[in-house]
Image (cartoon, coloured by chain):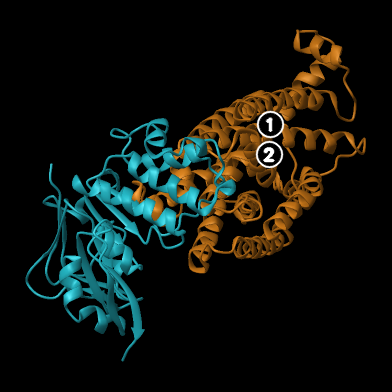
Chain colours: A orange, B cyan
Amino acid sequence: MIIGSLSARRWRTIAVASGLALSLLLGLSAGHQWYSLPSIFRALGGSDTLDAALLLEWRAPRVLTAAFVGSLLGACGAVFQGVFRNPLAEPYLLGTAGGGALGAALALLVPLGLPGFLSLLGFSFLGAWGATLIVLLIARTAGRTDPVALLLAGVTVAAMLQALRSGLMLALSDDNISLQTILSWTLGGIQTPSWGGLLMLALLAAGLNFSLHRFSSGLDRLGLGDDYSATLGIDPANFIRRVVLVAAMAVAVAVAWGGLVAFVGLMAPHVARWAVGPLHARVIPASAVVGAMVTVLCDAIARAALPPGEIPLGLITAIVGGPFFLVILMRHYR
Amino acid sequence: MSTEVLLEGGLEVERSGRSVLSLKGPDPLRLQDGGMIGVIGPNGAGKSTLLRVLAGLVSPSKGRIRLNGRALHSLSPTARAEMIGYLPQTLIPAWDYTGREMIDLQASRNPANRKSAATIASEMNVHALLNQRWSRMSGGERARIALAGVLAAESTILLADEPAAALDVQHRHYVLKELARHADSKAVVVVMHDLDLALAYCSRILLLANGALIADGTPMSLLSVDALDQVFGVRFQMADIDVRLGPALAVGATAGN
């Protein structure tokens, strides 16, 4: 029985890893124009047809961007759930992503004379961090007994931030930056960067995922309660502050490249825990992998479902993730 | 190595501006190894506060605590964790850890000086629970795992807050026996509600009421004074003396006052 469950865990790990590989292939294949598997391998192998060039210059960077954004959302979901000890926590529902989007919209719309993309990232981070600190404050006041109270606080903060952002967009959009562009981005949409931009994202995602992973053992101990973790050598308040800072950076990067993508951070840790158990040293990387997988798949649907148009990614993840959230909520109350 | 915890006389602990624990007088309160120390008293007496102060979770507003000569508040969280083992009243993990993971997490407070989960599990006879998930364990099984976890890592003092309160008789005795067994080499301080058990397992009892220390002595000396009756507001009678169990079983509390 015990041996059986251990090997079952290994199988689940293998399933999750091969799921990512398959979803990457599907992501490369799906779209306005579908690529067959042989044509994908030919393009990756260095074929110089126009199709191959399109695949490598346009689709591959986008699929990889979706994977990196998803990995950050998944890992952040695991980390937020660990910090708040709440299986319903995630960057989107807690308002962190909304704060990031407000900051990013500010950077896009208000001429600040700063280098464009860096100010976008910087403001997105400030927004994400600020929103999370507000929710953290409310959570501390309300106590951690009721996971739904935290969610209500988060959703309220997110709604206020969205109102601010919408007002800002209506007031400040002009011919240079159309409302359409920003709107489609805030509904969630993976950017298609150049390979240089992709490299930057890859480095940021790798560094942030690594930094988040370093909090693993602290998050495990935090899972035994504030007081008890304090007797295990952690300063809970200080630890949570540091985690939230790094997590806000990660959300800011995800928002900058992928807009507002709902529920990926909620789903990924649950699938990950099912696959690898509750220890964060495994949950965080597994959540990153599952988050990447889910985002790549949803992005593939977004590109392929209604050609030649594109459905905003955030709508797809909400349609997939909403029911998931409701199931977890019902299981919590049962 | 002997252990000495020193609470300076005049120690005060406040919560929202109200004094919840206050040690009067110039004499310090000394807690040592060599016999389990029980803390008893009615609800709101400050028992748990005393324990939380000793664990470094609450800082006194006046006075200081010295652990083998070192001021408790000056220790880093890690240094404190290495020296102090703490068993809370109830352990409610947010995630469904296995027995082995629970032991490892608890023992992580002193990683350089700990027993492996397998070693402590065979010592404490909880091997069967190592791969069991917390949600699948009974209350007694959880208590055994929590105890194994706190005993897995070496510590100078061991604190337990009503470790037996929610358990059935068999497990209550099991937990207290294990804690008492470790009192030879470390200072073991246990908050207790059950007076019978306190008298049976402790070699020294601190009686608290309204945040003040009312009595401090052996169980026998405590039974011979009226302090117990006054503090608890009931009249205690000695029912029997069982030589195997310890000095006394204070049974038959009749309503007084």
Tell me if I can see residue A136 in this picture. yes
User: Which residue corresponds to the image point at 89% horizontal and 30% vertical from the top-left?
Assistant: A32
Q: Is residue A256 left or right of residue B252?
A: right
Please tell me which residue lies in front, B34 or B146: B34
User: In what quadrant of the picture does the N terminus of chain A appear?
Assistant: top right
Q: Is residue B219 left or right of residue B99?
A: left
User: Which is in the foreground here, disc 1 or disc 2?
Assistant: 2
Chain to which mark 1 belongs: A
Badge 2 amino acid? Val
User: Which residue corresponds to the image point at 78% horizontal and 22% vertical from the top-left?
Assistant: A25
Q: Is residue B81 left or right of residue B119?
A: left
Q: Quadrant of residue A203?
A: top right
Badge 1 amino acid? Ala
The residue to which callout 1 is attached is: A67
**First-in-chain label (1 vs 2):** 1
Label 2, residues with CA under 10 Å away: few <14, some 14-19, many ≥20: some
User: Where residue A223 appears, x then y in whole percent?
Assistant: 49, 49
Q: Residue furthest left?
A: B26
Q: Secondary structure at mark 2?
A: helix
User: Where residue B5 appears, x then y in whole percent?
Assistant: 16, 56
Label 1, residues with CA under 10 Å away: few <14, some 14-19, many ≥20: many
User: Which residue corresponds to the image point at 39% horizontal and 43% vertical from the top-left?
Assistant: B149
- Vertical position of residue B15 compared to residue B183: above or below: below
The residue to which callout 2 is attached is: A271
User: Which residue corresponds to the image point at 20% horizontal and 59% vertical from the top-left?
Assistant: B203
Please tell me which residue lies in front, B61 or A294: B61
Measure the C-alpha gap from mark 1 to mark 2.
17 Å
Q: Is residue A230 left or right of residue A277?
A: left
